[in-house]
Image (cartoon, coloured by chain):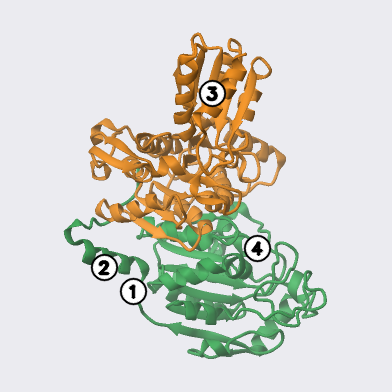
Amino acid sequence: MNDLVNPVEPFLRSDRMPHIWCPGCGIGTTVNCFARALIESKIDLQSLALVSGIGCTGRVAGYVKLDSFHTTHGRAIPFATGLKLANPKLNVVVYSGDGDLSAIGGNHLIHAARRNIDLKVICVNNLIYAMTGGQTAPTTPDHSTTSTNPYGVFEPSFNLPHLVEAAGAVYVARWTTYHVRQLARSMSEAFQKKGFSFIEVISPCPTLYQRRNKLGDGLDTMKDYKEKSKVRHGAPTNEVGLTMTGEIIVGKFVDRDRPDYQTMMRAQLAESLGERFVEQAEMVCS
Amino acid sequence: MKADPRGVLTGVHFIDGDHACCEGALAAGARFAAGYPITPSTEVVERFASRVPTVGGTFIQMEDELAASITLQGAVWGGAKAFTVTSGPGFSLMMEHIGYAAMTETPCVFVDVQRGGPSTGLPTLPAQADMMQARWGSHGDYEIIALCPNSPQECFDLTIRAFNLAEEFRVPVMFMMDEVVGHMTEKVVIPPADQIDVVPRKHTHKSVAEYLPYGTNGDLVPEIAHAGEGYKFHVTGLTHDERGYPNMTPEVQGKLVRRLQNKIRIAADRIAMFEEGQLDEADVVVVSYGITSRVAQRAIEMARARGLRVGKLRLITAWPFPESKIRELAARVKAFVVPELNLGQMVHEVQRAANGQAETFSVSHAGGGVHRPEDILTTIVEAAR
């Protein structure tokens, strides 16, 4: 019977199933990819911590069998920053939604990218505030209908890869939940990358985005993603903005190197303080 | 355990309260601070930024107080003793994360060097008008501990106490300074490290299989584990059971929230610190805290010179409020006089605890300066009548 155990099950808190996500939701698919990336990259699970904010994707922290933190709305990145700085040996993944990371948490997103904090940010972008019932997000495409723009969205949306590249991210990729192998591979790559990495995953919300915009169900969305996605590695990020029905440019857009925050901090302090600089000991204050 | 000597600047110093607070944090073992500049508190983190790389630790200036107040909590779960420092407007922004620290039982210290409010108010001038905000500012039912130093020496001594209480009870501790105490320069004696008691983190000794992140024994304070140690625990601001798992039932909510309250309330008399003076034959007791206690001292002396029987009760712990002490005094004194740099905050607690057994007089001041001793004296005279 053991042969029938799902390979991702050891990475999940089975005692918390069933999860809260709707039928057709893409978040579970991304978690599956995440677990496969953990297997593929053979990353040390004991030194891996996962931090989420609030929202549907914010619930990921509760389902993974890792040290996991479900923090406050928008503040997963600063929490993760403290965790990483206090214990640099940890690999810290931030796993949250588009509203959490780019609206209420938008300031932290750009500053963490600017500082090049060594965090792996997985942003599940379902184009909407789902947990609260389908309100407009900074990512909701023009002309969509939402519960707070019942006559249509008219404000421009964020192009997240462009935003985080401009702010300084060293690794930026985008996939949809149709691209499960590519997504898992990008996650593995980001685990190996030192610095601020950002992976956007376009994901369906059949209950609140697709339904309200007459875009069909979860399966229709998969077909849509398949037809409308174009893989363009290295695409200039100013060209990858999303529209409601247009093509979805996916791929690895940015992969560059620059020193991360802690490397720069240690170099600066060592240069300025000389022998007076004391390396941070393990902070465990037991 | 005793303080790590690397963080202790043993000696006799002439420094202000903000700098003394920083030295207290270092002596207590704080090796992480996240902050955002705001008058009149910034000197605390400026000194920390200068000192901590020579001790082995990290300061990060965040993009705002929302970030600072949660970054420090990430550092705590990474194993550090951590704090942040702010003043009124920043303290307002931190409220959600005080609730998060209370709910997740993250031991940490929030320093608030109080200035005049509301809003931007008086950035460079004193007030004590955040006392109720410290207690009630975040939503929901929770308990915190708040301390009020009245001198640079106490900014040092009580910052250590603040960290120790945070660790003992796994609770956010509010360190309620005011602009005058923060900027007042006086002698500060920092003892040798082996004379400074430091409470270690209540770290679990249980095995991974036995460990329940929010399970408690008799003392209502759960044992903690840090990220990276293999416990694979979950922390959430949602209502959670002993495993740390979300649970949306009234039963689990009641059990959790009552425990968070009781772990402090039951220990209130043990946590309470106050300074008494000539209470034995007092007719009138002046209840004060922070910088106001030093003005009140002068008023008490003036009143006693007139033959009035006046005693003092200085609150060092503001929260939990030392209710039993007030109740005990109320049974035998005529009145309480409560001067404070606000339009009446802690006076309501005094009145509540006195429960009609003694009269309560407020001596309010909207902030921007300190009381004149004569104003407090006038009310003492009135109260003694």
Label 2 chain ID: A
First of labels 4, 1 by sequence position? 4
Q: Estimate how packed mark 2 is, as few (under 14), some (14 to 19) or many (20 or more) residues with alpha carbons within 10 Å.
A: few
Nearest the camera: B253 or B337?
B337
Label 4 chain ID: A
Residue B377: mark in rendering:
3
Nearest the camera: B347 or A30?
B347
Residue A267: mark in rendering:
2
Q: Disc 4 vs disc 2: which is toward the camera?
A: 2
Q: Quadrant of the N terminus of chain A?
A: bottom right
CA separation, marks 2 and 1?
Answer: 10 Å
Q: Which amino acid, by three-letter code, is at mark 1?
A: Pro
Residue furthest left in the image: A275
Q: Position of residue B215 (x, y in %)?
A: 53, 37
- Determine whether label 4 and label 2 are within 8 Å by CB: no
Give the colour chain A carries in the figure: green
Q: Is residue B152 above or below residue B30?
A: above
Is the residue at mark 2 from the same chain as the one at mark 1? yes
Q: Estimate how packed mark 3 is, as few (under 14), some (14 to 19) or many (20 or more) residues with alpha carbons within 10 Å.
A: many
Q: Which amino acid, by three-letter code, is at mark 4?
A: Cys
- Badge 1 is on which residue? A259
- Badge 4 is on which residue? A56
- Residue shown at 57% from the left, 20% from the top: B380
- Residue shown at 45% from the left, 52% from the top: B72
Label 3 chain ID: B
Q: Disc 1 vs disc 3: which is toward the camera?
A: 3
CA separation, marks 4 and 2?
Answer: 40 Å
Q: Disc 2 vs disc 1: which is toward the camera?
A: 2
